[in-house]
């Protein structure tokens, strides 16, 4: 590959973003980090870099993975490159200085190791002023229950990217019901194979298709919860 001698700085914004999609596809971590740095230097907002350069690049990777053109080892490299880019953006997105609007615990459910979407949701929620406790991947129901007890969050978030792991979300919600604590918390779920209908069927308060919608929905649900509490008091 002659990518090495390509000077990313000589590219226009549009060319650079296109090059970053290619670099993400090829799992080139250093190039992704450099691309993110350049776009930020050029005055792009962290959110714009995230959505237009990284998330869009990962969308393209996802299509070729689905179609059998890319395989797990390659996608893992892409995911690592994406994470390196996200690492640079995280502190910038969280830098709002706003008072904390609520607390969320979030984790990927048992059997599932996908965490890019969950990490993105965490970043955007932090950026919107939420305190986020990230439980990581492959979480059995016990982890959620322990974290709920320890952190007393406003929101319990679950992520699943596999059709085989998404039913596990109901296991967690049912365990909350059994313990008599379900109604104390807002349960939000997400992940590519989910939809609104699924969210309702398992008894979640909300399904959100992406991180931006999650932030808006979370604010809305917290406000509603506060109103309810105020009325009840
Ligand atoms: C990257 C990736 C991987 C990486 C994961 C690396 C990592 N650290 O995450 C690796 C290579 C490890 C991997 C492994 C596997 N993968 Co995979 N993977 C993907 C891929 C290409 C992209 C996922 C991604 O990161 N998307 C980008 C993020 C930003 O989007 P997102 O996750 O959807 O998140 C957004 C929303 O969903 C939402 N959201 C997400 N979580 C939450 C949580 C809450 C609370 C809320 C409100 C919102 C929310 O907001 C997010 C941000 O906007 C998808 C393809 C796809 N189209 O999704 C396949 C995909 C999910 N994988 C798939 C498969 C089959 C697998 C494997 C089984 C492959 C194998 N044969 O081993 C393994 C499973 C391993 C396991 N046990 O989990 C299938 C699933 C098919 C199915 N119907 O179940 C997919 C759909 C690919 C395909 N079409 O075949 N994978």
Image (cartoon, helix red, strand yellow):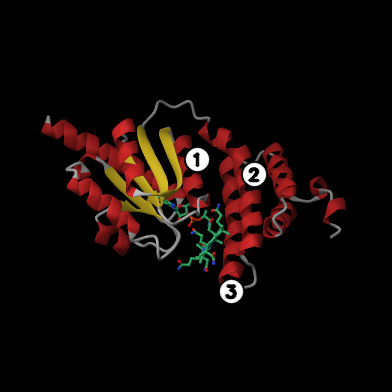
Question: Where residue 84 is drawn, which disc sits there?
Answer: 2
**Is residue 45 visible to us here?**
no
- Judged left or right of residue 45, residue 154 is left
Q: Mark 3 CB in 8 Å range of ligand 1?
A: no
> Residue at coordinates 41% horizontally, 34% vertically from top-left?
130
Rounded to the nearest angstrom, the CA distance separating label 1 from label 2 is 14 Å
Relative image position of residue 159 (x, y in whole percent): 41, 52
In which quadrant of the rendered view does residue 147 lie?
Answer: top left
Q: Quadrant of the C terminus?
A: top left
- Of the two numbered discs 2 and 3 on the same chain, state the one appearing first in sequence: 3
Q: Mark 1 = which residue? A: 123
> For the residue carrying disc 1, how many other residues have a C-alpha within 10 Å: few (<14), some (14-19), or many (20+)?
many
Question: Where residue 157 is drawn, which disc sits there?
Answer: none
- Of the two numbered discs 1 and 3 on the same chain, state the one appearing first in sequence: 3
Please say if the residues under marks 1 and 3 sit with CB atoms less than 8 Å apart.
Answer: no
> For the residue carrying disc 2, how many other residues have a C-alpha within 10 Å: few (<14), some (14-19), or many (20+)?
some
């Amino acid at each position: 590959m002659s990518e090495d001698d390509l000077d990313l700085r000589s590219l226009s914004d549009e060319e650079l973003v296109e090059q970053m999609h290619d670099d993400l596809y090829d799992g080139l971590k250093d190039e992704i980090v450099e691309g993110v740095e350049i776009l930020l230097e050029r005055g792009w907002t962290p959110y714009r870099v995230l959505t237009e350069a990284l998330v869009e690049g990962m969308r393209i990777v996802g299509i070729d993975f689905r179609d059998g053109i890319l395989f797990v080892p390659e996608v893992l490299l892409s995911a690592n490159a994406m994470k390196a880019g996200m690492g640079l953006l995280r502190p910038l997105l969280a830098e709002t200085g706003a008072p904390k609007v609520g607390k969320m615990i979030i984790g990927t459910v048992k059997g599932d190791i996908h965490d890019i979407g969950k990490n993105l949701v965490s970043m955007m929620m932090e950026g919107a002023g939420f305190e986020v406790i990230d439980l990581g991947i492959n979480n059995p129901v016990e982890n959620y229950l322990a974290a709920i007890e320890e952190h007393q969050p406003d929101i319990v978030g679950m992520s699943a990217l596999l059709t085989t792991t998404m039913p596990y979300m109901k296991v967690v919600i049912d365990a909350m019901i059994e313990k008599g604590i379900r109604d104390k918390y807002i349960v939000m779920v997400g992940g590519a194979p989910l939809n609104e209908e699924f969210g309702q069927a398992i008894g979640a308060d909300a399904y959100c298709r992406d991180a931006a919608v999650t932030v808006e929905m979370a604010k809305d649900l917290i406000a509603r919860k506060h109103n309810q509490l105020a009325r009840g008091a």
